[in-house]
Image: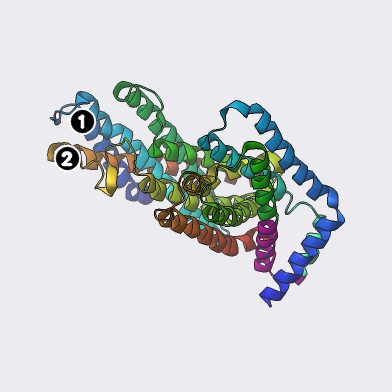
């Protein structure tokens, strides 16, 4: 990578870093509304960020799988798999932060809720995607077959996550009825942390993905 | 052209199945013995809810078993031959329709076994039969696609379950919701919402199968 490229790719990484620094520091200072869950509301800046990051990563993986099937370029398969990897990482972090929060506010680590079901199903799908990749030896065949699975599974997962919860209409998460996310308990003051934090987490996801893609490409060049 | 190819391929599958009867007999016996095992295991606790859950879970497992062989049953050389004479769309549509036939038979048989052993809990038979037909179609199309994916990898069988269970959930939960309605009230109003979702899922899966299968078919 030339020096120019390095600077060109630097600004968004720096931006993500600064936004998260802001969210981590100011997230603990900002005045929050008095609710039943009091101070633990601050977790919204971190826990929800994991879901935003996961969603962004899995969508990226889906898009690059589509692009792979159009031109069969190995580069795009590498992005698809690494985006899925980072998506899984964020997904598990979201589950862990959510479980700790749930234990303290709802009284149990796991409760029956469409949002939790959707998250768990997403993890199952992408772990299965990794198992599928592991069981095909030929590189091109692996890329092609796993891209097909990724597209097929992602669309059905979207149906599961976005459509079915509206049907059952009984989530204990606060963002019911398709209202703007967290509108119920985010005051204007908390929003000045919430939105930057979300952008920060997504950018962090892209940064990790970017590094992993570069490592893998170096590995591929060594083999060749 | 497509219709002709699909017809010929379905005919071929039916002939093949009738010739190698042990595969079909195997899956029928699998269904019967699974229903019987659950009947003995759940004897005391058959409520409407358990009836519903058991019915669809058994059907899911039977479907995974019955459909997993779809693309590994014949020799690889013969698939190369089909590749030269039929379009991939015709292949996948014929497999989906063939598996729909299989699933419809299996689900009706399963329903019959449930009636015999665990009593009739269905109060809206029309709706339940509709759920069976649409469910057979959905199960057949999703599982056919997953079978095609799994057939391209080694360790085909466990992969089939691992890949299909999470992605079949939107379909399965909608089906269970509709059939719960059929088990609890004879009324039709209120069933339109889930039925529309079920149809949408089926349509989406068919379109995806039609578009994506060609990538699995050629190497």
Percent of width and height locating residue B205: 54, 58
Question: Residue B91's image quarter?
Answer: bottom right
Q: Which mark is residue A27?
A: 1
> How many C-alpha atoms fall within 10 Å of the one at disc 2: few (<14), some, or many (≥20)?
some
Question: Residue B116's image quarter?
Answer: top right
Most common SS among magenta residues: helix
Q: How far apart, in angstroms, are the residues tagged by discs 1 and 2?
A: 9 Å
Q: Residue at x 23, y 29 (%)?
A: A42
Q: Residue furthest right?
A: B19
- The kind of secondary structure element at disc 2 is helix
Percent of width and height locating residue B22: 84, 48
Percent of width and height locating residue B109: 69, 48
What count of labels does the image hold?
Answer: 2
Where, quadrant-wise, is the N terminus of chain B in this rendering?
bottom right
Q: Is residue B171 above or below residue A190?
A: below
Do tags 1 and 2 sit on the same chain? yes
Per the image, the residue denoted by label 2 is A192
Stretch in magenta: B85-101
């Amino acid at each position: 990578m030339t020096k120019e490229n390095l600077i060109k790719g630097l600004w968004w990484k720096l931006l993500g870093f600064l936004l998260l620094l802001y969210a981590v520091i100011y997230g603990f200072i900002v005045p929050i509304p008095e609710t039943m869950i009091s101070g633990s509301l601050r977790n919204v800046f971190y826990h929800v960020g994991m879901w935003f990051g996961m969603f962004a990563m899995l969508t990226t993986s889906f898009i690059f799988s589509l692009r792979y099937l159009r031109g069969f370029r190995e580069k795009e398969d590498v992005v698809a798999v690494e985006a899925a990897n980072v998506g899984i990482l964020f997904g598990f972090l979201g589950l862990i932060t959510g479980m700790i929060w749930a234990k303290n506010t709802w009284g149990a680590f796991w409760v029956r809720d469409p949002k939790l079901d959707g998250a768990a199903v997403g993890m199952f799908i992408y772990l299965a995607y990794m198992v599928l990749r592991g069981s095909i030896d030929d590189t091109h065949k692996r890329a092609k077959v796993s891209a097909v699975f990724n597209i097929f599974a992602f669309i059905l997962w979207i149906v599961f996550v976005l459509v079915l919860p509206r049907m059952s209409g009984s989530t204990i998460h606060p963002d019911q009825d398709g209202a703007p996310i967290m509108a119920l308990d985010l005051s204007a003051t908390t929003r000045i942390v919430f939105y930057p934090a979300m952008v920060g987490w997504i950018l962090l996801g892209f940064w990790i993905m970017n590094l992993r893609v570069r490592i893998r490409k170096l590995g591929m060049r060594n083999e060749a | 052209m497509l219709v002709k190819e699909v017809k010929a391929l379905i005919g071929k599958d039916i002939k093949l199945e009738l010739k190698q009867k042990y595969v079909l007999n195997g899956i029928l016996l699998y269904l019967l013995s699974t229903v019987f095992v659950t009947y003995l295991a759940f004897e005391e606790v058959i409520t409407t809810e358990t009836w519903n859950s058991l019915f669809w879970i058994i059907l899911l497992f039977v479907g995974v078993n019955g459909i997993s062989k779809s693309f590994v049953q014949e020799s690889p050389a013969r698939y190369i031959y089909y590749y030269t004479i039929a379009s991939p769309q015709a292949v996948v549509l014929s497999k989906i329709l063939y598996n729909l036939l299989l699933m419809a038979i299996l689900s009706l048989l399963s329903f019959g076994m449930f009636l015999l052993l665990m009593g009739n809990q269905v109060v809206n038979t029309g709706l339940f039969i509709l759920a069976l037909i649409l469910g057979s179609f959905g199960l057949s199309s999703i599982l056919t696609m997953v079978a095609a994916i799994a057939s391209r990898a080694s360790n085909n069988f466990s992969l089939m379950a691992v890949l299909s269970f999470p992605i079949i959930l939107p379909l399965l939960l909608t089906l269970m919701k509709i059939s719960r309605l059929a088990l609890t009230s004879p009324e039709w109003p209120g069933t339109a919402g889930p039925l529309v979702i079920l149809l949408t899922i089926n349509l989406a899966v068919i379109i995806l199968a039609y578009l994506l299968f060609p990538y699995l078919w050629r190497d």
